Image (spheres, grey):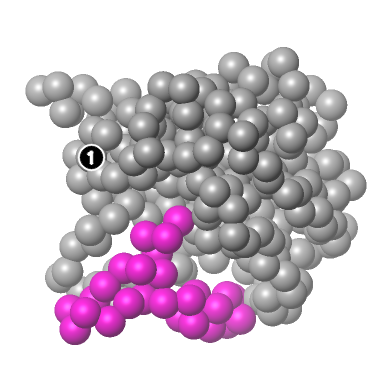
């Protein structure tokens, strides 16, 4: 009963309906491997028209991962009205997780702030790079590499990455549970499958791209169950 209650509480933290954003279209998917999961995404429109995005994956599985995810989400929501700037936002959960957890309790995540005009500033903390795609579905940049997850090192410094989404361009976020999913033969789903599908779905809306990735993953897995949570999110700057 406690696990079911924890699952229900956690499900409320991952949005079922994504907000309407003037300049952007969104798509998202979250599937947990156990009763309680550790993946998280959040899209929060700010009063000045900017969009704050938190995406990531807590360490471990089950209840332990769920607790780390819940703490990270709480810090994110608390920090937003105080200072949503990327530098402040990445340091706040890192500090709290370092003070309240241990070396095995961390959050590999991305925080990004999007301006209405398409400018993006992001911090990537121990998470797979965010893929930037052009309007033809080609990967033109991989944002983020080689940093500590949040909660590992209190005085860690993180380097911001910046880009601009022009009309029709898209950002794709995914947890490591997607490329590392193993099929019946033990083969990993892999990055190449993700990139191939993205090239085939050029111009599709974000929710269509997310749905296509999930369908491709399910075909690949067959009857095999994922042993890790899988989350995917996509955001595209609208065409005129």
- Tell me if residue 75 comes above or below residue 205 in the rendering: above
- Determine the residue located farthest toward the left in the rendered image: 1
* Disc 1 target residue: 62
Please give left or right for residue 99 compared with residue 239 in the image. Answer: left
Numbered range of the magenta stretch = 175-201
- Tell me if residue 177 comes above or below residue 155 in the rendering: below
In this rendering, does residue 53 appear at all?
A: no
SS for dot 1: helix
Q: Looking at the rendering, in which quadrant would you find the C terminus?
A: bottom right
- For the point 24% across and 50% down, which residue is it? 33
- For the point 73% across and 36% down, which residue is it? 86
Count residues near mark 1 (Cα–Cα under 10 Å), then give few for <14, some for 14-19, many for 20+: many
Please give left or right for residue 84 compared with residue 96 in the image. Answer: right
Confirm whether the magenta stretch covers residue 217: no
- Quadrant housing residue 90: top right
What percent of the width, then of the height, locates residue 12? 39, 27
- For the point 74% across and 40% down, which residue is it? 113
Confirm whether the magenta stretch covers residue 185: yes
Closer to the camera in the image, 32 or 65: 65
In this rendering, does residue 92 appear at all?
A: yes
Closer to the camera in the image, 72 or 16: 72
Q: Looking at the rendering, in which quadrant would you find the N terminus?
A: top left
Closer to the camera in the image, 191 or 196: 191
Please give left or right for residue 113 compared with residue 63 in the image. Answer: right
- For the point 35% across and 68% down, which residue is it? 180
What percent of the width, then of the height, locates residue 237? 77, 55
What percent of the width, then of the height, locates residue 197? 52, 78
Number of numbered discs present?
1
What percent of the width, then of the height, locates residue 85? 77, 31
- Quadrant housing residue 144: bottom right
């Amino acid at each position: 009963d406690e696990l079911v209650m924890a699952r229900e509480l956690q499900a409320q933290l991952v949005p079922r309906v994504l907000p309407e954003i003037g300049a952007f279209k969104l798509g998202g998917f979250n599937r947990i491997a156990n009763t309680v999961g550790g993946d998280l995404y959040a899209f929060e429109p700010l009063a000045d028209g900017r969009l704050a995005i938190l995406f990531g994956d807590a360490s471990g599985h089950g209840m332990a991962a769920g607790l780390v995810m819940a703490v990270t989400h709480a810090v994110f929501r608390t920090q937003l009205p105080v200072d949503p700037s990327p530098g402040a936002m990445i340091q706040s959960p890192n500090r709290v997780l370092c003070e309240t957890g241990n070396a095995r309790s961390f959050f590999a995540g991305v925080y990004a702030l999007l301006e209405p005009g398409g400018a993006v500033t992001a911090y990537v903390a121990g998470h797979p790079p965010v893929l930037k795609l052009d309007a033809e579905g080609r990967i033109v940049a991989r944002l983020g590499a080689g940093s500590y997850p949040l909660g590992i090192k209190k005085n860690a410094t993180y380097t911001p990455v910046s880009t601009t989404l022009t009309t029709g361009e898209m950002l794709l976020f995914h947890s490591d549970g997607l490329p590392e999913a193993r099929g019946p033969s033990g083969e990993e789903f892999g990055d190449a499958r993700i990139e191939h599908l993205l090239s085939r779905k050029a111009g599709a809306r974000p929710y269509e791209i997310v749905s296509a990735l999930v369908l491709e993953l399910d075909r690949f897995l067959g009857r095999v169950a994922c042993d890790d949570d899988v989350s995917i999110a996509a955001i595209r700057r609208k065409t005129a």
